[in-house]
Amino acid sequence: MHAITRQDSPKRSPWVPLRERLFNSRSRLRDRWRAPFGYRHVLRVGLPLVAGMASETLMLFIDRLFLSHYSVSAIAAVLPAGCLAFAAQIAFMGICSYASVFTAQYMGAKQPEHIGAIFWQSIWLSLVFGLILGASGFFFADGVFAASGHQGHIATLESAYFRILLLGSFPLLLGNALSAFFIGLGRTKPVLFANLAGVAINISLDWLLIYGRCGLPEYGISGAALATVAGQVLSAVLLACLIFSGSERGKYSLWASWPVRAGLMARLLRFGGPSGFNMLVDMAGFSWFILQVGRLGETALAASNIVFSVNSLVFMPMMGLNSAVASLVGTAVGSGNVNNAKKAATSALHLSLAYMMPMSFSLALGGEWYIDMFMPADSLPLSAETRSTGIILLWYVAAYSLVDSCNIIYFGALKGAGDTVFVMLALCWLAVFGLGLPILLLEHFGMTTLHSLWIVFSLYVTALALTAWRRFSSGRWQGIRLVDKRE
């Protein structure tokens, strides 16, 4: 019987595989940073939009912060009224801003001569939609909140805030149409500049009009709405000046393209309509959720409003990445390069997660600090209960914020590819069966509590994220043609 011998092999340090993996990871990160549609490309387009959305979020945040120190009734009224106003406006905003995807695809297809025409179609639509919304706010504001079931003085405040925001819809929609021009071209710094200017005037007017400083009347919640509209007017004026006073005026034949073009407008409505409608469904579901919370009393409503105001600091800036990835995917699809579209979406998702993770931890661990910013200075008896409730609710926001990255990025990518009909149908289905029906069942079986409502809402956000990821991963969006090559 022969002994089995084994040749000794040189020993390898256990750290070598780890070093190799780290080196390979650094190489992959470096490649994705430098490559077209990689991290650097996404950040170049997206950071000004993120900062711009952060500035708009800050504008709303400052409104609510000032009002929280003005009265508990004001902070209880501002979010339902603001959400319903935004829900009324958001479908039209989606249509006007969808011109950015057309612009991006025209650039990708090397057809810049058509950009001026799509620019003007969005301008005309913003005017028509602004008139419709203004009339709706004037005639229907009181009836909407009288039927909400909220307490009488809260409903009066909600109605005043809602009416002013809708009467000022045209500058908001015009600003979206003008921003779409720059976003589609991938030149997003002008949008940031205009938004920051709007925020500056809004914050100044908030202080003056809410409290009645410098001899002005004390308008309270109406003053916050007036300040918001004034900021939107300034942003739109600045964007218009930048567009019509620069080289774009001749480069894209802007003055010559002003007439209404029925065929192009119909195509903008065909693809932008579902995009705007799915935003409406999503926002309407959220607004209905807030109205249901309001039925539980002023404490539950005020705490939820404060928490959603904090949540907006996390969520809304990422909508800048949503617009950026839509523009980048649109450019890639317009040029016929699907791989670049996938690369842009993946890069944007990584960046979104890198932001969301620390923010989620801060919400979970630093809830007291966030909530205390909204506590009224006079320490009303209601404040202690509102504070403790709000701190607990922030845990829900921390939990669903991570999966919300998929929702934000992949729905943006699908929008850029023109897959807006699927997104509309998916959001309608989930709003009914993932949010509306469960809440009605809770009410039917007498199980409606603040926590049960928030659990349903968190599961709804998770379902949205999974749906967006599955659709983009399936690749079914690749056959959609937004830009006509024969133009």
Image: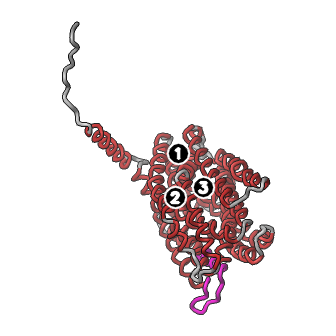
| Residue placed under numbered mark 1 in the picture | 334
Which residue corresponds to the image point at 65% horizontal and 58% vertical from the top-left?
451
For marks 2 and 1 on the same chain, the one whose residue lies earlier in the sequence: 2
User: Image height check: is 440 above or below 142?
Assistant: above
Q: Secondary structure at mark 2?
A: helix
Circles 3 and 2, Cβ within 8 Å, touching? The answer is no
> Residue 204: horizontal and vertical position, in percent?
54, 81
Q: Secondary structure at mark 3?
A: loop
**Three-letter residue code for mark 1:** Gly
Answer with the quarter of the image where residue 202 lies.
bottom right
Answer with the quarter of the image where residue 92 lies.
bottom right
User: Image height check: is 287 above or below 62?
Assistant: above
For marks 1 and 3 on the same chain, the one whose residue lies earlier in the sequence: 3
**Three-letter residue code for mark 3:** Tyr
Which residue corresponds to the image point at 72% horizontal and 70% vertical from the top-left?
134
| Residue placed under numbered mark 3 in the picture | 98
- Is 221 part of what is drawn in magenta? yes
Circles 2 and 1, Cβ within 8 Å, touching? The answer is no
Which residue corresponds to the image point at 42% horizontal and 57% vertical from the top-left?
44
Mark 1 neighbour class, 10 Å CA radius: few under 14, some 14 to 19, many 20 or more: many
**Three-letter residue code for mark 2:** Met
Would residue 177 be visible to someone looking at this image? no
User: Image height check: is 168 above or below 358?
Assistant: below
| Residue placed under numbered mark 2 in the picture | 318
> Residue 254: horizontal and vertical position, in percent?
55, 62
